Amino acid sequence: MNPGAVTRTVTSTSTAAPLGVLLVNLGTPDSTAVGDVRRYLAQFLMDHRVIDIPWPLRALLVHGIILRTRPRRSAEAYRKIWTQRGSPLMFHTEDLRHGLQDVLGPGVRTAVAMRYQNPSVEAGLTQLVQQGCVDVVVVPLFPQYSQAAWASAFDEVTRVAAGMRNTPNLRFVPPFFDHPEFLDAQAAVARPLLEGFRADHVLMSFHGLPEKHIHKSDASGAHCLRGNDCCAVMREENRFCYRAQCFATARGLAERLGLGPDDYEVTFQSRLTKAWIQPFTDQRLLALPGEGKKRVAVLCPAFVADCLETIEEIGMQAHEAFVGAGGEDLLAVPCVNAAPQWIEGLARIVREAPR
């Protein structure tokens, strides 16, 4: 599978039918109740793309260990960010869909789907087919490619489509980690905040992954994580490498924000073990005050919608830890969410989706 050019044609195209656009995000619990959080985590963690070990071991790990304690802790974290509109990830994604619908116009039908929980991929794709869509552009809302997010969304959409009586033509938007529309929109959100905050250092914090996921993405078996500069340039060996794509995103944002090499660094958050990709966001935040960096801004450009990882993990946990280590203040820069420039930019990305 090539995420840069995925096309799945099953039936003939009708020019009279509306175009469907399916926005696929990762997912969120239906509520902050422990039971709903447990169902979400179970579906997420039992995905072989997320924890890629044999099913019996995965089931033992997830149901026998993780789900005994984590749902209650996660539910407490979700309660801190839940709003009257519900989950931030859900309403930001729906706001994006609404704005995209307005820009793309009446010849297009849009729907939201979550890879895990609701609204499901089946519900979203069925909605578009019932509205007469023969062609569907699928937008996995993950800027960088990873098997745990982008590839998992691809798996689920194609699985659902394959089981439909009337299967639509599917066109997938590839990862947009270096797409000017995404970089310009994120820079536009960050620029005025950085100028007002007067940060003396910037972290670009991306969601972490196990190192073995990176090694598996390297077809050569001899490049990824083999040296300190393995992510410095995009090349054939690392074209599927999540870490390399994160560094490419950071370079593009730094250029747009006027940040020099010493003004920012790339880190990775949400680690579960030491065998995840480094450097770790939490460790760097504890060290920065001792290096004279007292006002730090954190961008999270692995996400297009603010969620638990950006609001609670960075905006609350990381802020408290940074100040406790001697920092003066930490600014959590919002994601692109439904910013007007991102809506317009995503509309152009949809229009240029590979045929």
Image: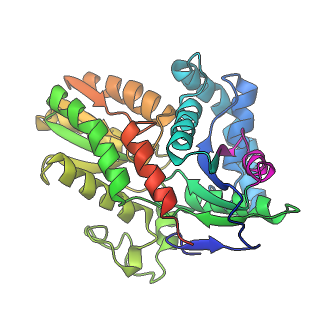
In percent of width and height, residue 213 lies at 52, 64
> Which quadrant does the N terminus fall into?
bottom right
In percent of width and height, residue 195 lies at 16, 32
Read off the magenta span: 110-132
Residue found at x 12% / y 50%: 262
Inspect the magenta stretch and tell me whether residue 74 lies in it: no
Hey, which quadrant is residue 87 in on the image? top right
164 up-or-down from 303: above or below: below
**Which sits in the foreground, 153 or 247?**
153
Taking 150 as reference, is 125 left or right? right
In percent of width and height, residue 52 lies at 64, 62
Colouring rule applied to residues: rainbow
Spot the residue most to the bottom: 220
In percent of width and height, residue 235 lies at 34, 77
**Which sits in the foreground, 80 or 105?**
105
**Which sits in the foreground, 189 or 238?**
189
Residue found at x 55% / y 38%: 93
Hey, which quadrant is residue 120 in on the image? top right
Hey, which quadrant is residue 325 in on the image? top left
> Which quadrant does the C terminus fall into?
bottom right
259 up-or-down from 38: above or below: below
Residue found at x 67% / y 45%: 113
Spot the residue most to the front: 16
Residue found at x 43% / y 34%: 310
**Which sits in the foreground, 278 or 123?**
123
Spot the residue most to the right: 165
